[in-house]
Image (tube, grey):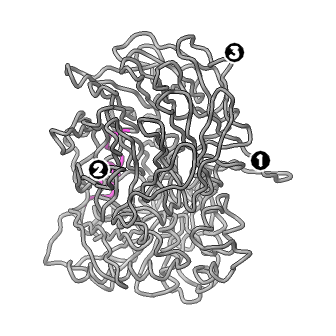
């Protein structure tokens, strides 16, 4: 319930720094942020008793230069990256730029662009040609807000535009023979695909209408769509394509796809092969759970993919499977692995290169499909990815000896890095964030046992920690639930790290249901939301009390999405927490089933629909235990959230208000599941920090 790789770039580009919003009084009526802002002018900004001033915290959260993608050339001699643009004041401008740097000859990076001179646009989705000489990329240089496909020589020159479409383009990829570029295309789309972005309000007669993302081809040599006078869409009009990969001979594709609504049906997507000449799709595998990242073996005889219990597209974790490209039974190559595979690629030497979550850390390894032998290449504290901030995608050279990506941790701001067989530690390629220091305290990995499970979590210490003092603690529960908290440099959505900067301990647990300890652990919360996972979290609080000077009478809890649900659940189960902030939470799983726009995600976790087994939804619904709540609770949500709709937060707030529990409810105008407005992002940070300061100091 938290992230989607397809749409995140559309959300991260417009991050901007904004100031001036302060804390609204408790018990305020729900409304848009415009309604709230009128009452904020005279309210004093929160001031931390210890730690950094609030403005310093927010500046650090927004100050880091951010990278959206890294692409290593097939020959390993050059590296390209997509970087968000900062102004002189450190503010992201809403544009993104592409740079290419020679790893062989050195020198300064060169900018690749579709526009003229120093013009700024939205540019990204970089793809190298097989000969490492050209780059395909998307840009809205021709018309603001409308991406088109371009190619340009990596050494520079005049870019060539290849498309003139109306709609949403994504994920261009060259054919292995270098003659054709495939791209995902959603014709006449009014917004980026995926349920994270703000939904379009519907009025009148409501119908099950949707836009389908299809696979399309363009002939590179002629600059025209392959075999036609316009963009050639080669997949059926009623089928939504999520991921695809070229076969080694450039004659076929493997795709993951589903009929009907693309935002909703990813959880039931099947694996198919596609003949582009005829458009014939052949289903070769209907999975038991969710699938991601299909790739071909070098000889074209097999296909590898990841299958597992996943709550969101783009939050990939599971086991590695293979299947014959003609179909048949799929084979689990990593059954029983105490880790979660997050990305894979099939190398020329026949081994599968993959990234994984192990405990609370990241790792890169190779798997021999013939023997099942796994060899780890790198493991460490931090996150390494070549795209976005939620996944763990890699960008290797063809020989697999070097891998490009973006590395970040609690102590290291993001930079483009390179891992090689001779230098396995992430080696910086850029120094965009040199001199930037954390505003938060030290992070320590802690473990504890509960119900036979070993649970891991991150404990952020207060900034300027004094062991002679006792501090408040706030638990920050990650989204998902199929996800993991790793050591990471916080982004503007990460208000929890701001709490550490303001003088709090922050516990980020990875309870059962998380990635990092294998599929059995990830599946351990099926039909059990709010029971075992919540007990794991409480046991983590007990462990934190043992290892750190924390005041047990000053505990708080927070989270967004699944974390928002867990916050609502926590305050209905215990009075141990003295303050709470529930972001985009779920109060009532029975009503939620009919309100959200992605109900397909619920079947694997609850076993049946709410109409077939209402009891399993009822027992995990906070609203059914609402009269136990005593905890002051702040509730935040976007008004256009399709994943965790606004009525869920309204229902919880209404109940608290009716029962006389201290509460505050803010609905943010035209925001989806993740907020795009920098003003709203800052308001979430300030409002959350002030809420906990008011109740835990």
Along the polypeptide, which appears first: circle 1 or circle 2? 1
Q: Residue at x 65, y 54 (%)?
A: 265
User: Vertical placement of 234 versus 238: above or below?
Assistant: above
Magenta span: helix, strand or loop, mainly? helix
Q: Residue at x 20, y 19 (%)?
A: 105
Q: At which x and y percent is residue 636? A: 54, 64
Quick one: SS at disc 3? loop
Q: At which x and y percent is residue 680? A: 50, 52
Q: Which residue is mark 1?
A: 209
Question: Quick one: quadrant of the N terminus?
Answer: bottom right
Q: Which residue is mark 3?
A: 229
**Which labelled disc corresponds to residue 61?**
none
Q: Quadrant for residue 448, please give it.
A: bottom left
Question: Quick one: quadrant of the C terminus?
Answer: bottom left
Q: Is residue 415 magenta?
A: no
Q: Residue at x 51, y 27 (%)?
A: 250
Quick one: SS at disc 2? strand
Magenta span: 52-67
Q: Which residue is mark 2?
A: 364
User: Vertical placement of 355 versus 445: above or below?
Assistant: above
In the picture provided, is 334 more to the left or to the right than 501? right
In the picture provided, is 656 more to the left or to the right than 426? right
Q: Residues within 10 Å of mark 1 (few under 14, many from 20)?
A: few
> Which of these two is toward me, 266 or 546?
266
Q: Quadrant for residue 626, please give it.
A: bottom right
């Amino acid at each position: 319930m938290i992230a989607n790789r397809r749409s995140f770039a559309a959300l991260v580009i417009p991050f901007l720094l904004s100031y001036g919003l302060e804390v609204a009084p408790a018990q305020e009526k729900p409304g848009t942020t415009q309604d709230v802002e009128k009452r904020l002018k005279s309210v004093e900004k929160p001031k931390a008793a210890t730690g950094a001033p609030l403005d310093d915290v927010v500046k650090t959260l927004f100050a880091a230069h951010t990278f959206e993608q890294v692409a290593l050339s097939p020959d390993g001699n050059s590296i390209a990256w997509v970087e968000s643009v900062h102004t002189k004041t450190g503010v992201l401008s809403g544009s993104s730029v592409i740079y290419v740097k020679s790893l062989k000859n050195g020198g300064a990076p060169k900018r690749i662009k579709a526009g003229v001179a120093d013009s700024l646009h939205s540019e990204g989705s970089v793809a190298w040609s097989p000969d490492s000489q050209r780059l395909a990329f998307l840009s809205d240089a021709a018309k603001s807000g409308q991406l088109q496909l371009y190619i340009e020589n990596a050494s520079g020159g005049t870019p060539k535009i290849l498309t003139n479409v109306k709609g949403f383009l994504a994920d261009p990829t060259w054919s292995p023979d270098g003659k054709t570029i495939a791209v995902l295309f959603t014709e006449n789309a009014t917004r980026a695909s995926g349920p994270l972005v703000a939904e379009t309000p519907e009025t009148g007669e409501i119908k099950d209408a949707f836009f389908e993302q299809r696979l399309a081809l363009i002939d590179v040599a002629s600059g025209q769509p392959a075999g036609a006078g316009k963009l050639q869409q080669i997949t059926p009009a009623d089928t939504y394509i999520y991921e695809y990969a070229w076969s080694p001979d450039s004659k076929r594709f493997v795709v993951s796809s589903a009929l009907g609504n693309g935002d909703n049906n990813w959880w039931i997507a099947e694996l198919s092969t596609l003949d582009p000449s005829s458009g014939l799709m052949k289903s070769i595998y209907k999975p038991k759970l969710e699938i991601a990242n299909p790739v071909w073996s070098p000889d074209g005889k097999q296909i590898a993919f990841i299958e597992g219990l996943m709550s969101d597209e783009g939050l990939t974790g599971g086991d590695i499977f293979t299947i014959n490209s003609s179909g048949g039974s799929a084979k689990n190559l990593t059954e029983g692995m105490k880790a979660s595979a997050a990305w894979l690629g099939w190398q020329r030497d026949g081994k599968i290169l993959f990234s994984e979550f192990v405990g609370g850390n990241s790792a890169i390894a190779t798997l021999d499909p013939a023997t099942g032998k796994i060899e780890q290449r790198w493991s460490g504290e931090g996150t390494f990815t070549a795209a976005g901030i939620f996944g763990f995608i890699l960008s290797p050279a063809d020989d697999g000896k070097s891998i490009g990506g973006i590395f970040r941790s609690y102590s290291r701001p993001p930079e483009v890095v390179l891992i090689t067989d001779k230098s396995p530690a992430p080696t910086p390629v850029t120094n965009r964030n040199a001199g930037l220091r954390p505003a938060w305290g030290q992070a320590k990995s802690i473990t504890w046992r509960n119900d036979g499970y070993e649970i891991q979590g991150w404990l952020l210490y207060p900034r300027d920690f004094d062991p002679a003092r006792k501090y408040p603690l706030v638990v920050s529960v990650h989204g998902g639930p199929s996800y993991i908290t790793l050591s990471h440099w916080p982004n503007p959505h990460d208000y929890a790290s701001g709490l550490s900067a303001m003088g709090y301990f922050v516990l980020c647990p990875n309870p059962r249901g998380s990635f990092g300890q294998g599929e059995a652990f990830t599946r351990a919360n099926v039909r059990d939301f709010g029971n075992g996972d919540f007990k794991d979290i409480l046991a983590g609080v007990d462990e934190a009390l043992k290892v750190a000077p924390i005041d047990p009478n000053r505990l708080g809890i927070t989270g967004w999405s699944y974390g928002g649900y867990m916050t609502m659940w926590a305050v209905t189960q215990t009075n141990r927490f003295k303050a709470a902030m529930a972001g985009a939470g779920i109060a009532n799983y029975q009503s939620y089933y009919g309100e959200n726009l992605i109900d397909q995600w619920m079947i694997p976790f609850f076993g049946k629909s709410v109409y077939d087994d209402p009891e399993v939804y009822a027992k995990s619904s906070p609203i059914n235990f609402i009269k136990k709540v005593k905890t002051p609770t702040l509730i935040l949500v976007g008004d256009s959230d399709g994943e965790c709709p606004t009525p869920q937060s309204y229902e919880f707030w209404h109940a608290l208000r009716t029962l006389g529990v201290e509460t505050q409810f803010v609905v943010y105008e035209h925001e989806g599941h993740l907020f795009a407005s920098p003003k709203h992002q800052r308001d979430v940070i300030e409002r959350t920090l002030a809420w906990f300061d008011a109740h835990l100091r």
